[in-house]
Image: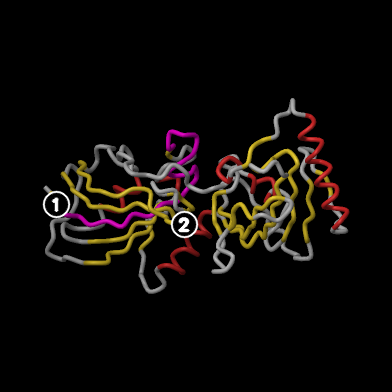
Amino acid sequence: MKKILWVGIIACVVLLNACSIGTTDVDPTSTDQLKKNQELVQKYITDNKLSMQQDASGFYYSVDASNTSTKAAVMGNVVSIKYIISTISGTVLDSSRIKQNIPQSYIYGVTTSLFNYAVNLMKQGNKGLFLFPQYSSSSGEPIKLELTLEAVRTETEYIDYFQATKYPTSNFTTTSTGVRYVVTTANAAGTSITTGKSVTVKYTGRLLFESKKIDNLGVLYYDSKFDEGTIEFTTGASQMIPGFEEGVSKLKQGEKGVILIPAAYAYGSSGVSNGTGGYNIPPYASVLFEVEVTSVK
């Protein structure tokens, strides 16, 4: 919402940057390490009889462009990818859920990400191989990224996809602002919510895609939740993000519902920082709230 206390949130929203997979930038002053990595990359290309180009930033790439799609990602699009990050010798450092055939989705271009280098050179449906001599694993080897760009969607396209996939039988209503809501538990006799009312709401806030997170024991898991709790606010007092108040106002006391909110009526281009350089809610993220109106006064 707006001034929610973000308690118990895992620091990383998605493991997209080099640090989070145990890799580091090669120190520019360490020319010996960079030279060694370059030699390892060249040997890998030669041994595997690959034809690769070198990007101006230093990494090498090969993209299978046999797919005829012209759909490229722009900032704010939701991209869905399958990937394996490994050392050049083959030790896997990170991957999407390959065995389950579940792509990883994230918002393109809003954070520093190893994936952005790849996606920037691809179209929807392309597969690519990317070698990064400028990054080293903890073992000192350069990094290899194998990536398939499964889908590129605008915000509205992704909300449509999410709704059809997660709520195929729910009859959402869409307001003039693009906020979508559905009443999941009705209470016709409940008090309506009008301007100036004090409203208490139990809520769970979620992104529209699952992110890889780390619990207190260091165990990786996937989850879309960024917050939950109970909050009291006065309608019409600009205490909430606009989409939350608009959606809640469609319910009555005792009712439950689901609200889908476009980024413009949620946290916009700023998102919500986690205080450690990442985001609990990325910029340009649509969000979902599962809500129950427990009191209207």
Amino acid type, mark 1: Ser
Residue 33 figure quarter: top right
Q: Could you tell me how many numbered marks the image carries?
A: 2
Determine whether, in the image, residue 237 is placed left or right of residue 76.
Answer: left
Q: Nearer the viewer, residue 83 or 180?
A: 83
Given the image, on which type of amino acid does mark 2 rest? Glu
Q: What residue is pinned by disc 2?
A: 210
Q: Which residues are magenta?
A: 273-294
Residue 7, position in %: x, y?
31, 41
State how far apart marks 1 and 2 are (Cα). 31 Å
Q: Residue at x 73, y 28 (%)?
A: 28
Viewer-nearest residue: 61 or 95: 95
Q: Residue at x 70, y 41 (%)?
A: 140
Q: Residue at x 32, y 60 (%)?
A: 258
Label 1 sits on residue? 295
What is the basis of the colouring in this image?
secondary structure
Q: Nearer the viewer, residue 11 or 4?
A: 11
Query: For residue 281: magenta?
Result: yes
